[in-house]
């Protein structure tokens, strides 16, 4: 394997944080916290942008078209955020002769990623299987890059591997002297057509015969996912998590991963991925992550091509706004910290593209639903935009394994959370450890464990009036991140529902008595398809300005060695969303 340049890695997260935390974030004497939020449904991009420019709304929950942004506007602030995803080539490693590593490496060398990135606004070339926005990304650590086409290098790799033009027809034969042609498949519309035509041309330049076929979207899906009848395809991946756990699913047989992995199989990769999954030491987790990305870089079952940046815009009178690679400026942390410059104005208006799917926090966790549900339902921990963990409903936590805890099996991990006293639900009843335990047990019995990243959740126990033990079937340190960001619901509410049918629970504010929450905001008005109004929860345990002081809100204890949570990145999510040329997408709601 190549030698990695580890000297820059400790700076990766600090640099990425500095890049997007360039907006003043300290509440001054002239700012006041936001008392209410109004989410306005505006389906049109132009409508949302016009409303923002005219001062009818204060920010748009997702990115904006850069062409709408006037750089000279005095009433807007602009921030760019690198996205946690990429466009990539999937190479079918089960298709001869693409099972030869040399030909896949030659394809990577021949691809001009810089040129392809130039097709898109705000795009840039990448090499690593975890995008640069991910704190565990190995981007920039390899001895070389595939950014620019190296046709001579590609030809040399093919020559050395025995791919020679025997009959002088301009195209190489395989090492067994057999002629071949690489099958390139594409949908018949969209950017993938241009990208794959580039690949077709570059393969021709290095003497590899290829064919390119265009399919309707339905036929294309079948070619890739049902028949696996392709050599090279272009896809896009959007990761809804900021940790390295997708890496140990690259060779999974689950449906969603087949396209991402290029049907790749490698024993060294599998062994390392299993160590990553069960490791408890942060330094080793980082090392395994880099090792796995290096294998993918050298073996090229997939070829990441480019990532991009989204543009976010918000009103000049807002302060405390931050952004991250998952939620842009609409993260729970950012919205909770919002202040306004005018002390006479404490309401903020947010444009969302669609109505929320449900106020059910187990069922609806992304998009506008995720933004709203993150504010009305509480979590045990707060993960900020520096990817640091802070006390939430839980004030501290310990991690235990066997034999430290003799009640555990050797493969289990227990996290003991200490829960705040005196916290109440919006109906005035007390939040108890029984509520917390019931929330985890309910999720464990439902089919939403995947969407909440709690696949290994086993059970939870209320062991006292202040402590809850949450037990997992694996010793992965990332179980702490997943448990810390799971929604906490009242036991009385959960007792009315079947875990297998929780998707049918659709609480409606004002008409349904079981929308009882404890988050920083609560629903004050809901007009389906039009408007959601939230008011600050007067009983929430953190004053708005305390959110600016993170030094007093972290109280973490653990008997495990060398675990530094400061650089561990996570924001709630689920399995990867795989998208074929920005069309095919597999994701949770």
Image (tube, grey):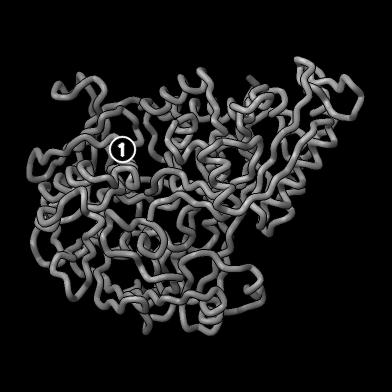
In x, y percent, where is residue 34? 35, 73
Count of number-bearing discs: 1
Residue 16 visible in rendering: no
Q: Is residue 45 left or right of residue 534?
A: right
Horizontal side of 452 relative to 14 (left or right) equals left
Q: Residue at x 36, y 26 (%)?
A: 278
Please determine whether, in this image, residue 435 is positioned above or below residue 4: below
Up-down relation of residue 116 to residue 27 (above or below): above
Residue 574: quarter of image: top left
Residue 28, percent across and down? 42, 69
Is 449 positioned to the left or the right of 162 in the image? left
340 is higher (above) or lower (below) than 416? below
Which residue does the image show at 66% across and 43% down from the upper left?
185
Q: Left or right: 444 with respect to 21?
A: left
Percent across and percent down for residue 111 are 75, 39
The residue tagged with tag 1: helix, strand or loop? loop
Residue 37 in view (yes/no): yes
In the rendering, at what x and y percent does residue 449 appear? 29, 43
Q: Residue furthest right?
A: 168
- The picture quadrant where one finds residue 148 is top right
Q: Relative to residue 271, is residue 56 depicted above or below?
A: below
Q: Give the camera-side residue of 197 and 461.
A: 197
Quadrant (top left, top right, bottom left, bottom right) of the N terminus: top right
User: Where's the C terminus, which quadrant?
Assistant: bottom left
Quick one: 115 or 37, which is closer to the camera? 115
How many residues crowd around disc 1 within 10 Å: few (fewer than 14), some, or many (20 or more)?
A: some
Q: Which residue is mark 1?
A: 455
Q: Residue at x 25, y 33 (%)?
A: 472
Could you say which is closer to the camera, residue 585 or residue 60? 585
Q: Residue at x 28, y 39 (%)?
A: 556
């Amino acid at each position: 394997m190549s030698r990695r340049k580890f000297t820059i890695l400790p700076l990766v997260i600090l640099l990425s944080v500095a890049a997007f935390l360039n907006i003043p974030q300290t509440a001054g004497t002239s700012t006041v916290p936001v008392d209410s939020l109004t989410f306005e449904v505006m389906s049109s991009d132009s409508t949302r942008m016009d409303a923002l420019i005219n001062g009818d709304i204060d920010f748009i929950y997702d990115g904006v078209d850069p062409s709408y942004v006037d750089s000279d506007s005095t009433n807007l602030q602009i921030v760019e955020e690198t996205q946690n995803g990429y466009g990539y080539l999937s190479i079918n490693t089960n298709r001869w002769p693409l099972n030869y590593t040399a030909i896949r490496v030659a394809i990577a060398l021949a691809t001009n990623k810089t040129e392809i990135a130039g097709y898109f606004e705000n795009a840039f070339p990448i090499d690593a299987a975890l995008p640069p926005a991910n704190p565990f990304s190995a981007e920039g650590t390899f001895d070389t890059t595939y950014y620019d086409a190296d046709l001579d290098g590609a030809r040399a790799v093919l020559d050395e591997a025995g791919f020679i033009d025997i009959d002088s027809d301009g195209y190489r034969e395989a090492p067994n002297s057999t002629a071949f042609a690489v099958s390139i498949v594409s949908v018949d519309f969209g950017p993938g057509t241009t990208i794959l035509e580039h690949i077709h041309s570059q393969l021709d330049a290095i003497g590899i015969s290829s064919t390119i076929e265009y399919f309707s979207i339905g036929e294309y899906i079948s070619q890739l996912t049902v028949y696996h009848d392709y050599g090279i395809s272009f896809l896009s991946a959007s990761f809804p998590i900021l940790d390295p756990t997708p890496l140990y699913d690259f060779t999974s047989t689950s449906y969603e991963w087949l396209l991402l992995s290029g049907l790749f199989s490698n024993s060294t990769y599998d062994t390392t991925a299993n160590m990553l999954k069960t490791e408890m030491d942060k330094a080793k987790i980082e090392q395994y992550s880099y090792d796995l990305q290096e294998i993918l870089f050298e073996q090229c079952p997939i070829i990441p091509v480019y990532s991009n940046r989204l543009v976010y815009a918000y009103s000049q009178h807002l302060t405390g706004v931050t952004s991250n690679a998952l939620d842009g400026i609409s993260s729970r942390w950012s919205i909770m910290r919002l202040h306004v410059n005018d002390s006479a104005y404490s309401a903020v208006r947010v444009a969302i593209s669609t109505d929320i799917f449900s106020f059910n926090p187990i069922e609806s966790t992304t998009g506008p639903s995720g933004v709203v549900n993150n504010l009305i339902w509480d979590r045990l921990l707060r993960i900020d935009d520096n990817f640091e963990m802070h006390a939430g409903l839980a004030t501290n936590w310990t991690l235990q394994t066997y034999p430290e805890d003799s009640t555990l099996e050797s493969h289990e991990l227990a996290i003991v959370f200490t829960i705040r006293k005196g916290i109440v639900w919006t109906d005035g009843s007390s939040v108890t450890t029984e509520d917390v335990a019931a929330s985890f047990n309910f999720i464990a019995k439902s089919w939403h464990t995947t969407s909440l990243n709690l696949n290994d959740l086993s059970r939870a126990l209320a062991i006292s009036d202040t402590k809850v033990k949450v037990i997992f079937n694996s010793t992965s340190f990332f179980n702490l991140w997943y448990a810390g960001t799971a929604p906490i619901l009242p036991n009385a509410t959960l007792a009315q529902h079947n875990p297998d049918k929780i998707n049918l629970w659709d609480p409606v504010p004002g008409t349904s008595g079981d929308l009882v929450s404890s988050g920083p905001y609560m629903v004050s008005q809901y007009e389906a398809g039009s408007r959601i109004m939230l008011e600050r929860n007067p009983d929430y345990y953190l004053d708005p300005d305390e959110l600016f002081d993170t030094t007093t809100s972290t109280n973490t204890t653990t008997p495990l060695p060398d675990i530094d949570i400061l650089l561990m990145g996570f924001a709630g999510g689920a399995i990867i969303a795989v998208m074929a040329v920005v069309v095919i997408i597999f994701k949770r709601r």
